[in-house]
Structure formats: C-alpha cells, structure tokens
Amino acid sequence: MSNQENMYTDAFPIGKIFPFVVVVVVLMLSVSSAIEWYADEVSLPRYCENPEEALRYLKANLQDERPAGDGARRPYLIAAKLIFLVPRDGGESLDDYLDRVELEIRSRCG
C-alpha cells in the first residue's frame, strides 16, 4: 500500500464510525416507535370518556383566537394535543378534519 492510499484510509476511519452511526439510527427508530405506541395506547384512549367535548374544545382551538377567554385553559390544552396526535392534512376543511379526528378517537375506543 502506498503512502497516498494509507493517508486516505487513516483520514476517515469508517470502521470506528460505523458502529456509532448504527447505534444512533437504532435509537432514533426506537424513540419513534415508542412515541407512536404511546399515542396509540395511552394518549388517544384518554379522549374516549367524552369525545364530543374534546371535539368541541378542538374546534374552538382551531377557530377562535382566544378560545378559553378568561376561563379555564386546561380543557383547551388537552384538546389541542389532538392536533399533534391526528395532524390536519393540507387543504382539509375543518369539518372534514373534525370528522376524521372523531373517527380516529372512536376507532381507539371501540
């Protein structure tokens, strides 16, 4: 092996970096899977008790600038979590989105 070839292999030790990259990718995938499991098994079923109320608060969150006014904000914050659990598609009307959220909640509660 010439000096020039040796210089290139020493400059980028892929054998030392590859295991680290694999560990990082596995961690990222496992975190993503854990988040999806938590959303499906823990977060969405919380709305089963009263889905109509959650949808009413969600609709207010999406339509009004200050949906809670001077009142309690907690129910609006809880409903706002639905926006992250069931994201709205681009160009989807509010009514279609609320129908889709309701179907999602009811499918988890069934």
Image (tube, rainbow, N blue to C red):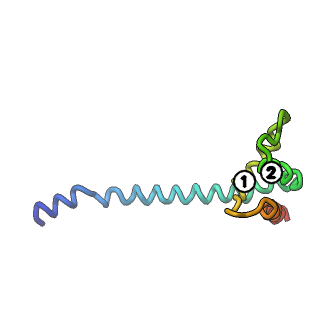
Q: Position of residue 82 (x, y in %)?
A: 75, 53
Q: Residue furthest top?
A: 70
Q: Residue furthest left?
A: 2
Residue under the image location 23 percent in, 55 percent down = 11
Q: Answer with mark 2 or mark 1, whichever residue precedes in sequence.
A: 2
SS assignment at label 1:
helix
Residue under the image location 74 percent in, 58 percent down = 41
Q: Is residue 70 above or below residue 25?
A: above
Task: Please tell me how crowded label 2 is: few (under 14), some (14-19), or many (20+) other residues with Cα within 10 Å.
Answer: many
* Near-viewer residue (4 or 75): 75
Q: Quadrant of the C terminus?
A: bottom right
* Near-viewer residue (12 or 71): 71
Q: Position of residue 90 (x, y in %)?
A: 67, 62
| Horizontal arrangement in the rendering, residue 36 relative to residue 30 (left or right) | right
Residue type, numbered disc 1: Ile
Q: Quadrant of the N terminus?
A: bottom left
Q: Position of residue 58 (x, y in %)?
A: 80, 51
| Horizontal arrangement in the rendering, residue 43 relative to residue 29 (left or right) | right
Residue under the image location 50 percent in, 59 percent down = 26
| Horizontal arrangement in the rendering, residue 35 relative to residue 12 (left or right) | right
Task: Please tell me how crowded label 1 is: few (under 14), some (14-19), or many (20+) other residues with Cα within 10 Å.
Answer: some
Q: Position of residue 86 (x, y in %)?
A: 72, 59
Residue under the image location 73 percent in, 49 percent down = 81
* Residue beneath disc 1: 83
Rounded to the nearest angstrom, the CA distance separating label 2 from label 1 is 8 Å
SS assignment at label 2:
helix
Evaluate if marks 2 and 1 touch, with contact meaning CB atoms under 8 Å apart. yes
Rendered image: mark on residue 58: 2
Q: Is residue 93 above or below residue 47?
A: below
**Residue 106 picture quarter:** bottom right
